[in-house]
């Protein structure tokens, strides 16, 4: 990466938003620029009707992300360092951008696939926990390591972990603060696939492409129903599911799918 390159790369192709954390020399640690750019990118993902799914990964083969840059971003968060330059100023104006950047409390429901090309530690692990489908390199590690730095995993992990893996495993991950291997992550259901490092992006992209065959609103409403109903009593959960079903049924795509099936042709979805 040259000095002129942005800290996040972003492109859109065939309904997929490709998001690449681009500080390989710093193990893709979150810089103020990276966080501000991610907030802008997620806003675009939410608003662009052509995007059906997002795929996020890290540049290089060493790290997905090591989390917040301890020399720059964390001191800015703790208000122990004054901002310097445009990106730090923009970040300091709204420090909650850190949470929005890693999808804590995201207000959109498009699916997000993670290609975990290398270690995902601290905030990098929290980012992974905010995604929906995860492909991990067999040599990578994942760890919620904040307690070892005198911090807590307040980027969503303390809420998400126990909803994604069994309680005892969630507590061990959060309290011991040590990284676990890819096979361990797969065994506890924290990731979907473990593959050779060179195949991570291709496997994740294949999953993203298969997801993108679905109707945009159906995809979003499916995720919304699952996220919003998680942990609720059945009656409340079914109410949310019913509303999402009703919302989707009112779309043109809900008519196009069955019509295309009967006419024996591929559906043409518009997101409307």
Image: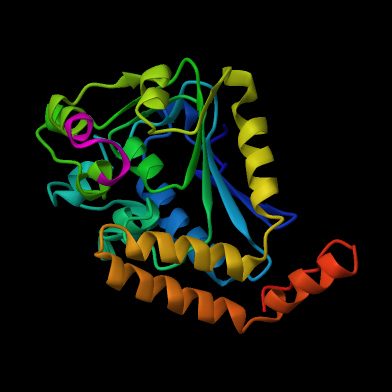
Horizontal and vertical percent for residue 217? 60, 70
> Which residue is painted at 36% across and 43% down in the image?
129
> Which residue is painted at 44% across and 65% down in the image?
224
Q: Nearer the viewer, residue 192 or 89?
A: 192
Q: Nearer the viewer, residue 179 or 60?
A: 179
Vertical position of residue 175 compared to residue 232: above or below:
above
Is residue 43 at least partly visible in the picture? yes
Is residue 21 at least partly visible in the picture? no
Vertical position of residue 97 compared to residue 190: above or below:
below
The quadrant in which residue 60 appears is: top right
Horizontal and vertical percent for residue 90? 35, 61
Q: In the image, is residue 167 part of the stretch drawn in magenta?
A: yes
> Which residue is painted at 13% across and 32% down in the image?
147
Vertical position of residue 147 compared to residue 222: above or below:
above
User: Relative to residue 102, is residue 156 drawn left or right?
Assistant: left
Residue span colored magenta:
163-170
Q: In the image, is residue 252 part of the stretch drawn in magenta?
A: no
Q: Quadrant of the C terminus?
A: bottom right
User: Relative to residue 103, is residue 44 drawn left or right?
Assistant: right
The quadrant in which residue 49 appears is: bottom right
> Which residue is painted at 25% across and 32% down in the image?
144
Tally the marks.
Answer: 0
Q: Nearer the viewer, residue 1 or 39?
A: 39
Q: Nearer the viewer, residue 75 or 186?
A: 186
Q: Quadrant of the N terminus?
A: top right
Horizontal and vertical percent for residue 251? 64, 81
State the colouring used for the structure image: rainbow
Horizontal and vertical percent for residue 179? 28, 22
Q: Main secondary structure of the magenta part?
A: helix
The quadrant in which residue 5 appears is: top right
């Amino acid at each position: 990466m040259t000095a002129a390159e942005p800290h996040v790369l972003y492109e859109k192709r065939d309904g997929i938003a490709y998001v690449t954390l681009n500080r390989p020399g710093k193990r893709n640690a979150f810089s103020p620029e990276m966080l501000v750019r991610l907030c802008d990118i997620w806003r675009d993902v939410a608003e662009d009707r052509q995007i059906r799914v997002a795929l996020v990964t890290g540049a290089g083969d060493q790290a997905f992300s090591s989390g917040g840059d301890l020399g720059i971003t964390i001191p800015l968060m703790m208000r122990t360092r004054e901002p310097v330059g445009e990106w730090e100023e923009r970040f300091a104006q709204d420090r909650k951008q850190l949470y929005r950047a890693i999808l804590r409390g995201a207000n959109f429901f498009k699916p997000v696939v993670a290609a975990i090309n290398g270690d995902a530690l601290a905030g990098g692990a929290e980012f992974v926990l905010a995604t929906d489908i995860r492909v991990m390199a067999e040599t990578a590690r994942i760890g919620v390591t904040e307690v070892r730095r005198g911090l807590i995993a307040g980027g969503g992990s303390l809420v998400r972990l126990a909803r994604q893996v069994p309680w005892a495993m969630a507590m061990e991950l959060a309290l011991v603060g040590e990284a676990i291997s890819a096979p361990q992550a797969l065994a506890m259901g924290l990731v979907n696939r473990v593959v050779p490092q060179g195949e991570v992006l291709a496997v994740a992209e294949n999953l993203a492409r298969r997801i993108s065959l679905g109707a945009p609103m159906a995809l979003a409403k499916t995720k919304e129903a699952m996220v919003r109903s998680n942990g609720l009593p059945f009656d409340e959960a079914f109410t949310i599911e019913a509303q999402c079903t009703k919302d989707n049924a009112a779309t043109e795509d809900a008519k196009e799918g069955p019509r295309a099936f009967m006419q024996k042709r591929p559906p043409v979805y518009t997101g409307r």
